Image (cartoon, grey):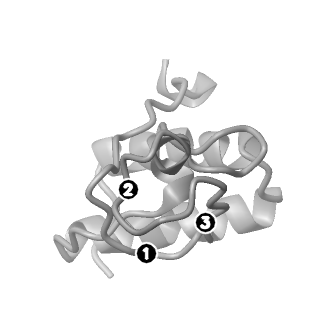
């Protein structure tokens, strides 16, 4: 694997922090942030619910609860760490990590 760029390092740290705040363990957050880096390098357009601003604190999907996701139940609690495509995906903006400031 090619060395990480400064942009990739900063994005990794921001994602790792967001995943940790959204309930993953530090080890799982680190592993998932690295998978995202590889996904980005491969230009894979799939996303995870844990990256979406529609993921609610209790694990439910706000877009589904509003009836915006065709065929999805309003009480949908998605698998938040699976790469997939969703018509209602919107990026959650992670807080900047201390290392990137």
Q: Residue 54: image x %, image y %? A: 50, 40
Q: CA distance from mark 2 to mark 3?
A: 12 Å
Q: Nearer the viewer, residue 39 or 73?
A: 73
Give the residue drawn at x 32%, y 63%: 86
The residue singled out by tag 2 in the image is 69
Lower sequence index among marks 1 and 3: 3
Quick one: SS at disc 2?
Answer: loop
Crowd tier of the residue under label 1, counting other residues whose Cα lies within 10 Å: few below 14, some 14–19, many 20 or above: some
The residue singled out by tag 3 in the image is 78
Q: CA distance from mark 1 to mark 3?
A: 11 Å
Quick one: SS at disc 1?
Answer: loop
Lower sequence index among marks 2 and 1: 2
Give the residue drawn at x 73%, y 67%: 28
The residue singled out by tag 1 in the image is 83
Quick one: SS at disc 3?
Answer: loop
Vertical comparison of 17 with 43: above or below? above
Task: Classify residue 51 as left or right of residue 7.
Answer: right
Q: Residue 71: image x %, image y %? A: 40, 69
Task: Classify residue 52 as left or right of residue 98.
Answer: left
Q: Residue furthest bottom?
A: 1
Q: Residue 62: image x %, image y %? A: 54, 40
Q: Nearer the viewer, residue 49 or 13?
A: 49
């Amino acid at each position: 694997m090619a060395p990480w760029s400064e942009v990739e390092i900063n994005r990794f740290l921001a994602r790792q922090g967001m995943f940790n705040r959204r309930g993953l363990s530090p080890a799982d957050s680190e592993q998932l942030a690295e998978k995202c880096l590889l996904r980005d390098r491969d230009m894979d357009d799939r996303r995870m619910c844990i990256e979406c601003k529609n993921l609610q604190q209790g694990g439910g999907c706000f877009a589904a609860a509003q009836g915006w996701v065709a065929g999805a139940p309003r009480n949908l609690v998605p698998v938040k760490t699976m790469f997939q495509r969703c018509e209602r995906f919107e990026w959650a903006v992670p807080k900047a990590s201390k290392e990137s400031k």
